[in-house]
Amino acid sequence: MRKITSQEIAEIGIIAAISFLLSYLPLDFFNKGLDLSVGLVPLAIFSVRRGVRASFSASIVWGLLALIFRGLPGAVSPIQVILDYPVAFAMAGFFGLYSRVIRSQLNKGITPKLSLKVIQLAFIGVFPRWFFHFLAGWFFWGSYLPKGTSPVMNSLVLNGTSFIANFVMVSILLVIIIHIAPNLFRAPR
């Protein structure tokens, strides 16, 4: 395994910071029940450019920034904090697993198949993150629900809706961006 370069470390920090800062856009709907995470878009582009290791590294740093600056006031237990922040955010690192697929398809030109691969990329990076938010909601936030409310259904509706909204948003934005600026997705030389 090759050593990580100082340029890659700098890029990891910059992408994590950009992704974190984008979380301050006022895009929370339904009393914060629906969370649109625009920071997934630059993370996905970076992940295609740099691959798995850099993708997971940036995702973890983003999760730690979110934990430090936004997460502790709403914490209900240490395990919930770990699931909702470092673990859930790290799962967005799965974007990097598809980097070779996207770059290979991109080398064949801008085609409908490339758009399909970008949508698959969006699913691979978005679903795992909200799955862990779902688990945290089920196991830890369920005790705060009104009596008779199913923690599983509540977490599934809230986190499932956020997953679908983020999947659609990331898919649309990435398809548009890869058609307008495909070089953003190419690995640096």
Image (cartoon, rainbow, N blue to C red):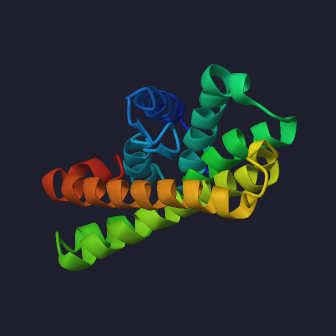
Image height check: is 8 above or below 105?
above
Residue in the image at 50% along x and 37% along y: 31
Does 176 sit left or right of 166 as displayed?
left
Image height check: is 119 above or below 145?
below
Image height check: is 92 above or below 67?
below
Residue 31 can be seen in this image: yes
Q: Residue furthest front?
A: 147
Front-most of residues 48 and 2: 48
The image shows residue 141 at horizontal and vertical percentages of 75, 45
Residue 4 can be seen in this image: no
The quadrant of the rendering that contains the N terminus is: bottom right
Q: Residue furthest bottom?
A: 113
Front-most of residues 108 and 169: 169
Does 123 sit left or right of 156 as displayed?
left
Residue in the image at 51% along x and 38% along y: 32
Image height check: is 101 above or below 58?
below
Residue 81 occupies quadrant: top right
The image shows residue 129 at horizontal and vertical percentages of 59, 54
Does 127 sit left or right of 111 as displayed?
right
Residue in the image at 60% along x and 29% along y: 66
The image shows residue 69 at horizontal and vertical percentages of 61, 20
The image shows residue 187 at horizontal and vertical percentages of 36, 52
